[in-house]
Image (cartoon, rainbow, N blue to C red):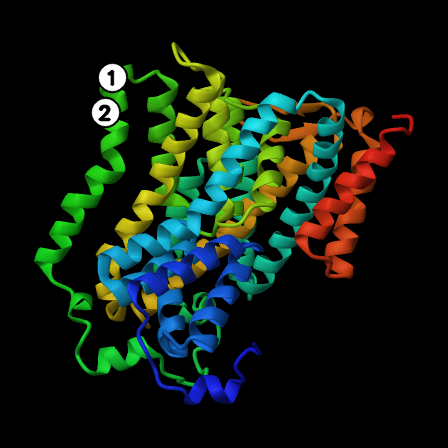
Amino acid sequence: MNAPSSTDTHTRPLQVPTFAEAVRVWARIGLLSFGGPAGQIALMHKELVEERRWIGEQRFLHALNYCMLLPGPEAQQLATYIGWLMHRTAGGLVAGLLFVLPGALVMLGLSVLYVIYRDVPLIETLFFGVKAAVLAIVVEALLRIGRRALKNDAMVAIAVAAFIGIYVFRIPFPLIILVAGLVGWIGGRQAPHLFLAGGHGGNNTAPDVKGAIDVMFERGELEHIKPSRRRAFTVLAIWLPVWLGPVLLLWLLTGSSSVWTQAGAFFSTMAVVTFGGAYAVLAYVAQAAVDTFGWLAPGEMVDGLGLAETTPGPLILVLQFVGFLAAYRAPGALEPLLAGGLGALLTTWVTFAPCFLWIFLGAPYIEALRGNQTISAALSAITAAIVGVIMNLAVWFGLHVVFREVHTFDIFGVGPDLPVLASIDWRAALLSAAAMIAMLRFKTGMVPTLAACALTALGMSYLPT
């Protein structure tokens, strides 16, 4: 059957999907949601706005702008929001869970294969090539976000300050986000022309093509979207225990120093400060997981990102890989693979449970947030700071991919990591350079670049090091 034309799509009667039909479509989106947030949002727009007309263009962008204000994966939250609009809380739960579940299951399987077969020479060589491609992917993300966020000297200064703060002085990522937001809040009042950058939701002047949800709204059929104090308290009373209850229970059962309590508390904190997507928070997670907790080796964090890049769903699923390895290596009385699976489940739970809280609590107040210039200025400053944080991530990955040895230049407890130049791995440097040329010059996709680097690494393994 041929796909419906644009004319057919915009003239056929609008119909709100049944719950069963919505489940099928959300499952399809979850299975096909490769390509990071941009690709995932484009897929939802095509499926929900263009083809099925479940939601209109303006309301879709309205919801996306709100989700961009939140910590966490904006594409998953957008799916939750639209599902909630159509079928209340049950619809939001189904949409959000099906967006994450396929990728989470794939990531769990890849994590198991990683710990079992990673020392096999063939697998080790493939991961060597994947690491080189991951470095190029991070650099491409840095340039893409930088072009959008750094519109003037003030934004550039915030990005540079954030990079120096986290790379040289090792200032915690949450503090950098807090300070950047405060600078934007103040700057938006004093010099709004410097801080009110372009919106995050795309072109807000797009044609106002209505969808089924918009017609329901005009008819007054969406009573559940009206904000109320009672409803807000109910959401908090349910979702705060759902999110943090397991962490508190693990603390009571295993103590504050157990890997379960540490992982639950750490990733719950990350869920609150993950503005700017996975690339922004990964630098802080990598440093904490490697240096503070000792859960991973530096190269393993790059391996995890490479695995997450090849799975559907949010890139933030790389945190599940970290949680798996943390519990796998400190299983206590449990079998290591079982402990690893439980660690992955815990990490996934505390990462995504708050996403439902943000939507169910805040979505009814979206109109109050829309167009607020002070919030927009704070968000612009945070986005600029995130560019500096991602730059730190690119440098951190580059050091551990291209060089075999890294030295910490430590003065009074702070200082940057510097490479030992004699330890350069020419194969990694060559692969990374080729991957950057492929992605930046020839616009090669992420998955083909990962595959090409892995296969090239196999050929290069027969060459002298």
In which quadrant of the rendered image does the N terminus lie?
A: bottom right
Residue under the image location 81 percent in, 30 percent down: 425
Q: Quadrant of residue 421?
A: top right
Image quarter (top left, top right, bottom left or bottom right) of the C terminus: top right
Residue 89: x and y in percent read 23, 57
Q: Which mark is residue 197?
A: none
Residue for badge 2: 249
Residue type at mark 1: give it: Leu
Position of residue 29 measured from the top left corner of the image (x, y, whole percent): 47, 59
Q: Residue at x 42, y 62 (%)?
A: 25
Q: Would you name the residue on which mark 1 appears?
A: 253
Left or right, residue 310 beside residue 127:
left
User: Is the C-beta separation of discs 1 and 2 under 8 Å?
Assistant: yes
The spot of residue 305 in percent (x, y) is 58, 39
Mark 2 belongs to which amino acid?
Leu
Q: Quadrant of residue 24?
A: bottom left
